[in-house]
Amino acid sequence: MATISRGRGQAAGGLPNLPVAQRSRPVLWWTTIGALILAFQLVVLTRWIFGPNYIPTAPGPDPLPHWQSVVFAVLQIGIPVGAVILLYIWVIRPWRIHRHLTTDSMIALAASTVFFWDMCMNYTSVSLLYNSHLVNRGAWANGSWPTWTSPNANKLPEPLLIVPPAYTALVFSQVVVILWLLRKAKDRWPRMNVVGTIAVIVVGLTLTDTLVEGLVLRTGVYAYPGGIRAITLFAGETYQLPLSETVLFGGFALGAIACLSHFRNDRGQTVVERGIESIKLSVKARQAVKFFAIYGAIHLAFVVLYMVPQQWFATHSDPFPDGYPSYMINDMCASGADGKTCPGPGVPMPRPAHNP
C-alpha cells in the first residue's frame, strides 16, 4: 500500500542520523520482545484449541430478536470480507510490487493480530461481554492462559468471524484514516511540532473509536457492563460506553501504532528499527528482524497502555446495568458469596485456587 505516513527528515521523525559506529542496536531488543510475545501467544492459543475449553458458549434460554440475527449474519459476512480486501490492499499488493513486505505492510499485519489481547478487559474482573449467538469457541482464558485470574472467563464467546477480522476492518482502518487527516493538517499547518502531532493522533483516535464502538454497541454484538458511570456515555444502559475504553484503547493503544508509523527518519525507518543497518544479515533475515521489532512494539504498547491500566477500571466499576439477557451474561458473573453475582462495588471477586 502507499506509505501510511512518513515523518519529514529529522524534524518530522525525530531520529538523528548518527554514524554507524556510534549507533546502538535497539532493534535487537525490540525483535526479542516481539519474538517472545508471539511465542507466548502461540502457546496460549495452542492450549486453547487443543484443550477442553475449545467449545461454543451456550446462549441460554433467552431468545434473540430477529433483527439482531439479521444484523449478525451481515456482520459475520461483511467484516471478514472487508478485512480480506484491506489486507490485500495493505499487504499483498505491495508485496507483489516490491517483492518484500514494506514497513507499512508489517505495521498492518502486526496491528491485525492485536485481537489476542481483546478479552484482557476480563483478566481480573468481568467488564466485557459478547453475544454467544455469534460463531464462537469460548475464549483463550482459564485453562489456556497462565495466571488468568477472573473465573469462568473461558465462557466469553469471542466472535471468531467478527473480532479477529474487525481488528483490520474496523480498528487499524481508524489509524489509516487519522494518519491521512494528519497529513492534510500538516499541509495546512506545516510548523506543527511533535506535541501537536501526538495530540492530533490521540484525540483523533479517541473520537473515531468512540464513534465506531458507539455504533457497534447498539447492535448487541458486545457490551461494556463494567464501567465507571461518571466517565461513561449512556451510563446505566446495556449499550453504555466507558470513556476509559475509548481513551486507553483508541487514543493511547491505537495512537501508539499511529505514532510508530508516522515518526520516521529520512531513511523511512521507524524508531524500533534503529541500528538495523549495522547488523550483517541477509535481506530475508533483516526483514524478519524488522518485522519482529515492529510486532513487539505494537503488542507491547497494547499491554502497557491498554491491558494493564484497564485492570484498575475493571476492579473499580459500578454495578452492571439491568437487562442483559442470558446470551450476554453467559454464566460469567462468578462473584460474591454465592459465586453468581455480577461484579460491582462491595462484591468480593474470587480468585482461582490454581492457575494453569
Image (tube, rainbow, N blue to C red):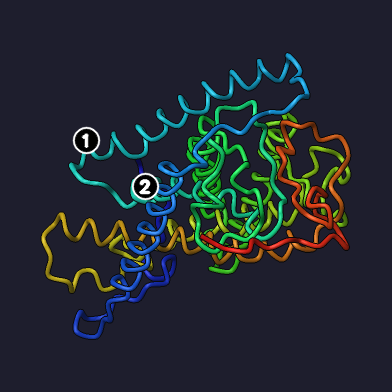
Depth check: give the residue in front, 298 or 343: 343
Label drawn at residue 356: none
Residue 344 locus on image (x, y percent): 84, 56
Residue 236 locus on image (x, y percent): 88, 44
Residue 190 locus on image (x, y percent): 52, 59
| Quarter assignment of residue 215 | top right
- Type of amino acid at the residue the image marks with label 2: Thr
Depth check: give the residue in front, 345 or 28: 345
User: What residue is shown at x 52% (from left), y 52% (from top)?
Assistant: 143
- Type of amino acid at the residue the image marks with label 1: Arg
Closer to the chain start, of discs 2 and 1, is 2
Residue 320 locus on image (x, y percent): 84, 47
Is 40 placed above or below 24 here?
above
User: What residue is shown at x 69% (from left), y 48% (from top)?
Assistant: 207
Residue 44 relative to residue 253: left or right: left
Residue 277 relative to residue 133: left or right: left
Depth check: give the residue in front, 265 or 70: 70
User: What residue is shown at x 62% (from left), y 50% (from top)?
Assistant: 205
- Which residue is identified by label 2? 3
Q: Furthest residue to the bottom? A: 22
> Badge 1, how many Cα within 10 Å: few under 14, some, many 20+?
few
Depth check: give the residue in front, 141 or 65: 141
Residue 214 relative to residue 18: left or right: right
> Badge 2, how many Cα within 10 Å: few under 14, some, many 20+?
some
| Disc 2 to disc 1, C-alpha distance | 15 Å
**Image quarter in which the N terminus is found:** top left
| Quarter assignment of residue 159 | top right
- Which residue is identified by label 1? 96
Disc 1, SS: helix
User: What residue is shown at x 66% (from left), y 37% (from top)?
Assistant: 130
Disc tally is 2
Disc 2, SS: loop
